[in-house]
Image (cartoon, grey):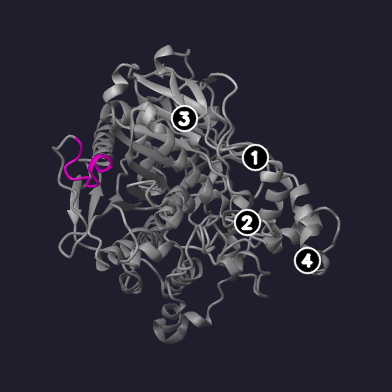
Amino acid sequence: MKKLNFLLILGILISYGCSKGLDENSVRTISEGEVIGYKEDDTFAWRGIPFAQPPIDELRWKAPLPPEPFESRLEAKEFGPECFQPQGIMGGQEGEWTGSEDCLYLNIWSPAWSPEQLTDKKVPVMMWIHGGANIIGSANMYYPVHLVREHEVIVVTVNYRMSNLGWFRHPALRQEGSSLEDASGSYGTLDNIMALRWIRENISAFGGDTDNVTIFGESAGGHNVAALYASPLARGLFHKAIVQSGVISHSKTEDAESYYPEDGTSGITSSKEVINQLLINQGKADEVEGAKALQNSMSLKETETFLRNATPGELLTAYGEANPKRGGMTRVFNDGYVMGKEGISEPFVNDQMPRVPIILGTNRYETKLFNMMNRRFVRWGEGEGIFSWIGVDELPLEIMRPDFYNAVTQYSSDSWKERAADTPARQLVASGYKKTFVYRFDWDDLPVIQGVDYGVLAGAAHALEILFLFPAAFDNFIIKNVVIRDSYDGAKKLSDQMLSYWAQFAYTGDPGKGRSNDLPKWKAWSDEEKYMILDSDEGQGLVMVDNEVTVNSIYNELTNDQRFTEEEKCQSLFAMSYSGDEFPVELLDSYSDGYCLTLDYSDILETMNPILGEDDDQDS
């Protein structure tokens, strides 16, 4: 079944441009040879430029290698393949796949400068890393023409390997002769580092400043930006970072290559459990214990051969089936080389590490994107209305207990904010780094459609801010007349303001008053003021606030919230302690003289993904 949700909207509409005829003024000479692009919307664009050799055959689970020289001029008018993944956010049947292992391509947009104009150009470069739980997504979805055209920057969007093709660690893959990068298992992170190396070597040919590169990304892309912020191998390759809704946490290498404990709980999908599933799926074992015994009898060479002979579809099928309890997005791990032993959080607390200016932020109601599809909160019905023509066969009919729905999403979203923005910002400033900026995106001026208030249902949900940074979709019929409708002018104004802040940060490392120099001053995190609210004039507008979210503030507010029954308070505490490494289970134990310990939480575990709050039996 399909649902009307923001991921579907984004999937249709963010990739808005279409390929045009080649333009001789767009010819550029890079390390691999000549490349020609095309002109669109007063910018030049180059699609599908390889930044590494295809990571296929013997290069699967190897660090990326520099691309081979072109045999002739590259006509960069078509996107390269997206990286291999389950059939994308537009739906598709279980077991269907899209993309390719040959996927390490990037796309570039620049102002439409002639070769003569390029001689004195040296503008900021912004590298976008897409989201999608490190399982789905593509650089090809995003159309940054407004940012490029209106603020004279260069934007590069990049692909990277995902799932167990991107992060996969096993002794069989680091035998004699393996480099430290090969042995790390952190191939997706290495792909992003290789893209930055390519930019350093080539972007000046497009008018870009190699000494002014900003990395930015959303959700898993924001998480990957934080990983680059922490990686010793990425130092000097970028100079600013923007983390949008990216949780600052990592998995442990020992968990990445160990069998799960008896209770099945782990922070990462283990390579050994993936091999168990592969053995079962190929009929070599009937159940997990038999697969485990067979795997333990295999030599490292036999295991390597077995893994390399598997198709990408077989690998990702086993990866999904081996998902542990408390599983969720594919997170980086502290491999000790690409990522240090202290992992992704090290630069936020270690004042001996080099840091660069950073923006951290989340959306007010991150988890509404997932909770809106949970039948515990929302009643869904057949889609006979205005959306049926785009294949949506179920629509939300009623938000059951709207106050309760808002309360649940408030605390789970605040927990997200605590992990992704407020705690990392506090840590950075406490360790002496002051160029730390934080935002919360609050826009929720959505319409009432067929009796359902989408401002309550979805509001400032996860990923919605992407539309405001890639606003080509604003003039699409569905967005303009259905999603935004009467709020178009206010939404467009907020989009312009956000682009101005993002561009100014790329230029200077301080969003300040925006590139336009006429916006409210966005100040660094301090004792007096903490973060910028990003909202339309119909809401709060642009305003600095001084409150912050901590584990204790969540606990204190939640346990006194009259929108919950006592049992519901326990359930909310349980969900946060179960899904968030930083939310201590001791708070659950201590509440109400141990009352929470007497309850059964199995129904919650059966009906929601504890990381995201998503109903398991619904497409998302």
Name the amino acid, label 1: Glu
- Residue 242's place in the image compared with 159, above or below, is below
Disc 2: CA contacts within 10 A as few (<14), some (14-19) or many (>=20):
many
Q: Position of residue 569 (x, y in %)?
A: 42, 72
Total marks shown come to: 4
- Residue labelled with disc 2: 168
Among the two numbered marks 1 and 3 on one chain, the one whose residue lies closer to the N terminus = 3
Element under disc 3 = loop
Among the two numbered marks 1 and 4 on one chain, the one whose residue lies closer to the N terminus = 1
Q: In the drawing, what numbered circle is on residue 101?
A: 1
Query: Is residue 339 shown left or right of residue 518?
Result: right
- Residue labelled with disc 3: 15
- Residue 590's place in the image compared with 113, above or below, is below
Query: Is residue 360 shown left or right of residue 399?
Result: left
Task: Characterize the magenta stretch by its predominant secondary structure.
Answer: loop
Q: Residue at x 65, y 70 (%)?
A: 264
Instruction: Give the magenta range.
Output: 505-515
